[in-house]
Image (cartoon, rainbow, N blue to C red):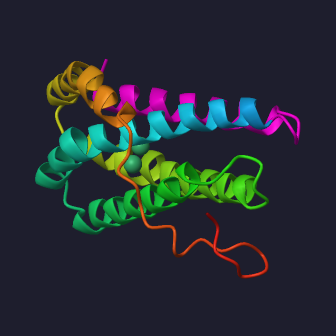
């Protein structure tokens, strides 16, 4: 499978998981937490694979430095939000709001990748190389995913406040 097909498949998987999350009942906190942890694992793995393998190849071959720099920033913002969601209880009033914003960030990012970056990659990178990149992504996936599944270092939650301005523990 070529790299673009592989990455698009990941995108669809995350979209399915977000749809699963939205279909859950408001008070299905355990089920929500389970789906959200799956989404987070998928996103961390996918972002790392892009950053390690696809983005450097795109940067080297396609003439669109801005696109790749913007993509790194979008990944960065996604990771910040993930770090906040990871320390928030699923029954917190801001939990689903953060998940919705995460979904919206991802939608925007995926759209830019699929409508701009990937078509440019197809132009700039030879089909055989895209195949090789796809193989490299799949070969790297198990280790990258295992690392993504490891407990995250505790982040500062000083920026997290509830609606009344109190710190969230
Ligand atoms: Fe990305
Ligand atoms: Fe992506």
116 part of magenta stretch: no
Q: Position of residue 102 (x, y in %)?
A: 60, 55
Q: Taking 102 as reference, is 151 left or right?
A: left
State the quadrant of the C terminus: bottom right
Q: Quadrant of residue 148?
A: top left
| Residue 24 visible within the image | yes
Magenta part, dominant SS: helix
Q: Position of residue 103 (x, y in %)?
A: 63, 50
- The residue stretch that appears in magenta: 1-28
Q: Taking 46 as reference, is 82 left or right?
A: right
Q: Quadrant of residue 125?
A: top left
Between 99 and 130, the one lying in front of the other is 99
Asked if 49 appears above or below 96 in the picture, the reply is above
Asked if 119 appears above or below 101 in the picture, the reply is above
Q: Identify the residue at the far left of this view.
A: 60
Q: Position of residue 163 (x, y in %)?
A: 78, 76
| Residue at x-position 20% and y-position 42% | 52
| Residue at x-position 29% and y-position 33% | 147
Q: Position of residue 164 (x, y in %)?
A: 78, 80
Q: Quadrant of residue 53?
A: top left
Q: Taking 32 as reference, is 133 left or right?
A: left
Q: Taking 159 as reference, is 101 left or right?
A: right
8 part of magenta stretch: yes
Asked if 66 appears above or below 43 in the picture, the reply is below
Between 127 and 23, the one lying in front of the other is 23
State the quadrant of the N terminus: top left
| Residue at x-position 46% and y-position 33% | 42
Asked if 102 appears above or below 158 in the picture, the reply is above
Between 139 and 64, the one lying in front of the other is 139
Circle count: 0
């Amino acid at each position: 499978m070529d790299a673009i097909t592989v990455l698009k498949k990941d995108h669809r998987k995350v979209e399915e998981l977000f749809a699963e999350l939205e279909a859950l009942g408001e008070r299905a906190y355990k089920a929500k937490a389970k789906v959200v942890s799956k989404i987070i694992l998928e996103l961390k793995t996918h972002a790392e694979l892009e950053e390690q393998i696809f983005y450097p190849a795109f940067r080297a071959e396609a003439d669109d430095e801005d696109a790749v720099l913007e993509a790194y920033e979008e990944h960065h913002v996604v990771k910040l939000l993930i770090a906040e969601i990871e320390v928030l209880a699923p029954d917190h009033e801001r939990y689903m709001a953060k998940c919705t914003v995460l979904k919206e960030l991802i939608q925007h990012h995926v759209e830019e990748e699929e409508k701009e970056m990937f078509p440019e990659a197809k132009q700039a990178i030879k089909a055989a190389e895209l195949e090789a990149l796809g193989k490299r992504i799949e070969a790297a996936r198990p280790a990258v995913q295992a690392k993504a599944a490891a407990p995250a270092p505790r982040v500062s939650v000083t920026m997290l406040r509830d609606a009344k301005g109190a710190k969230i523990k």
